[in-house]
Image: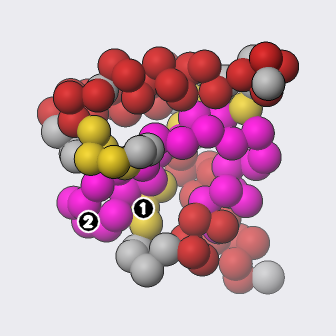
């Protein structure tokens, strides 16, 4: 369990479109795979908001920091605090994994 907590992967943000709750999650797989899986299992349209490199420990820290906006589990109300947190984290990571590139990659995979 200790090793898993320090596995480097991606912290990602998905929102029930267009203004619904936001999921703060972690994946050690590709972000595209995780988004695809989430979209297939959700009855709602999900919008990818961005991501940044991190570990499960980072995911829990983010969720704890935003606990005042927590809806349930990994889902949060789209409050100003949550939106600002996402903007800050994804802006800092934009040179590593731009959201537009991830979404574009998903669209090209879907077209194949």
So how many labels did they put on this image? 2
Residue that mark 2 sits on: 18
Q: Position of residue 19 (x, y in %)?
A: 21, 60
Is 103 on the left or on the right of 112, as rendered? left
Q: Are marks 2 and 1 in contact (CB under 8 Å)?
A: yes
Q: Position of residue 74 (x, y in %)?
A: 43, 44
Residue that mark 1 sits on: 47
Above/below status of 105 relative to 74:
below
In the rendered image, which quarter is residue 93 located in? top right
Q: Quadrant of the C terminus?
A: bottom right
Task: Name the mark on residue 6.
Answer: none
Q: Residue at x 70, y 78 (%)?
A: 110
Q: CA distance from mark 2 to mark 1?
A: 8 Å
The span shown in magenta is 10-36
The answer to if 35 sits in the magenta stretch is yes
Q: Residue at x 83, y 19 (%)?
A: 3
The answer to if 4 sits in the magenta stretch is no
Is 8 on the left or on the right of 54, as rendered? right
Q: Which residue occupies the foreground of this view, 85 or 57?
A: 57
Q: Residue at x 76, y 39 (%)?
A: 28
Q: Residue at x 49, y 74 (%)?
A: 42
Helix, strand or loop at mark 1 = strand
Let me know if residue 91 appears in the view.
no
| Number of residues whose C-alpha sits closer than 10 Å to that of mark 2, classed few (under 14), some (14–19) or many (20 or more) | few
In the rendered image, which quarter is residue 103 located in? bottom right
Q: Which residue occupies the foreground of this view, 99 or 6?
A: 6
Q: Position of residue 49 (x, y in %)?
A: 43, 48
Is 21 on the left or on the right of 51, as rendered? left
């Amino acid at each position: 369990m200790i090793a898993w907590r320090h596995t480097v992967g991606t912290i990602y943000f998905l929102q029930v479109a267009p203004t619904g709750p936001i999921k703060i999650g972690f994946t050690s797989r590709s972000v595209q795979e995780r988004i695809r899986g989430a979209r297939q299992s959700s009855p709602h349209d999900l919008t990818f908001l961005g991501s940044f490199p991190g570990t499960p420990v980072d995911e829990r820290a983010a969720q704890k920091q935003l606990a005042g906006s927590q809806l349930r589990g990994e889902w949060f109300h789209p409050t100003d605090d949550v939106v600002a947190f996402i903007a800050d984290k994804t802006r800092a990571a934009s040179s590593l994994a731009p959201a537009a590139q991830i979404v574009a990659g998903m669209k090209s995979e879907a077209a194949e």
